[in-house]
Image: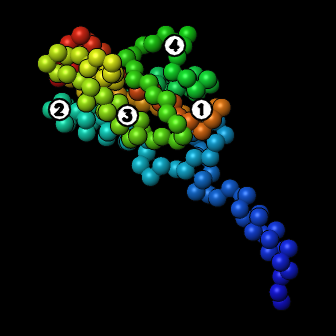
Amino acid sequence: MTMSPSICLAILLLALVSQSPASASIPGTSNNGFAVAAPSVPTATQFLQAHNDARRDVGVAPLTWNSTLEQDAQRYADRLSIGCKLEPLDIELIYLQNTYNGSGYQDGAAVTASWVNGRRWYDYRANACVPGHDCGAYKLMVCSTVQELGCARRTCRSSPDTVAVCSYFPDCDYNDRPY
């Protein structure tokens, strides 16, 4: 028995518009309705590993993951995802934070890589960023007094773009050299 071309076309169209399991929403995460493929490495592991790689490169002890810091970062990232802008919010900041806003889906490793990129603008001797460039996120990542980390990333509500926040403890004195 053969199928008519119109039935074959209808089946093909249904297959194309159906959401595949690989691109389905990840249960338990807030991606604001956008389909996101499950990361092969958990997001927390991506953030922690990338931070510790940067710290190892400059001889600083590794960080440990802190779920309280993660919850703080989550709270802030949730609010940032509403407007999808890195703007001051009316939330009291408890911990030092790095924030990120990028185009499309960005995982924890990509977010952290953007902060590590600030290393090229950091002048260790002057303990300052090269004029006209930002390196503050990098300095916070590798600050030797920081021991714990918690991060969260969210897909923006109005687009498939990404916002992310990492919270750090204890504080780092920005005026001191980070390592």
Dot 2 and dot 3 residues touching (CB under 8 Å) = no
Relative vertical location of residue 28 with respect to residue 75 in this rendering, above or below: below
User: Distance of mark 2 from mark 1, alpha carbons?
Assistant: 34 Å
Whole-percent x and y of residue 111?
41, 35
Q: Quadrant of the N terminus?
A: bottom right
Whole-percent x and y of residue 45?
37, 42
Q: Nearer the viewer, residue 123 or 74?
A: 123
Q: How many neighbours does mark 4 have within 10 angstroms: few (below 14), some (14-19), or many (20 or more)?
A: few
Q: Which mark is residue 156?
A: 1
Q: Which mark is residue 58?
A: 2
Element at label 2: loop
Q: How many neighbours does mark 3 have within 10 angstroms: few (below 14), some (14-19), or many (20 or more)?
A: some
- Residue type, mark 2 in image: Val
Q: Residue at x 57, y 39 (%)?
A: 29
Q: Earlier in the sequence, mark 2 or mark 4?
A: 2
- Residue type, mark 4 in image: Pro
User: Distance of mark 2 from mark 4, alpha carbons?
Assistant: 31 Å
Whole-percent x and y of residue 166?
41, 27
Q: Residue at x 35, y 37 (%)?
A: 113
- Residue type, mark 3 in image: Ser
Q: Earlier in the sequence, mark 3 or mark 1?
A: 3
Which residue is disc 4 drawn over? 88
Element at label 4: loop
Which residue is disc 3 drawn over? 114
User: Distance of mark 3 from mark 4, alpha carbons?
Assistant: 20 Å
Q: How many neighbours does mark 2 have within 10 angstroms: few (below 14), some (14-19), or many (20 or more)?
A: few
State the residue lying farthest toward the front: 132
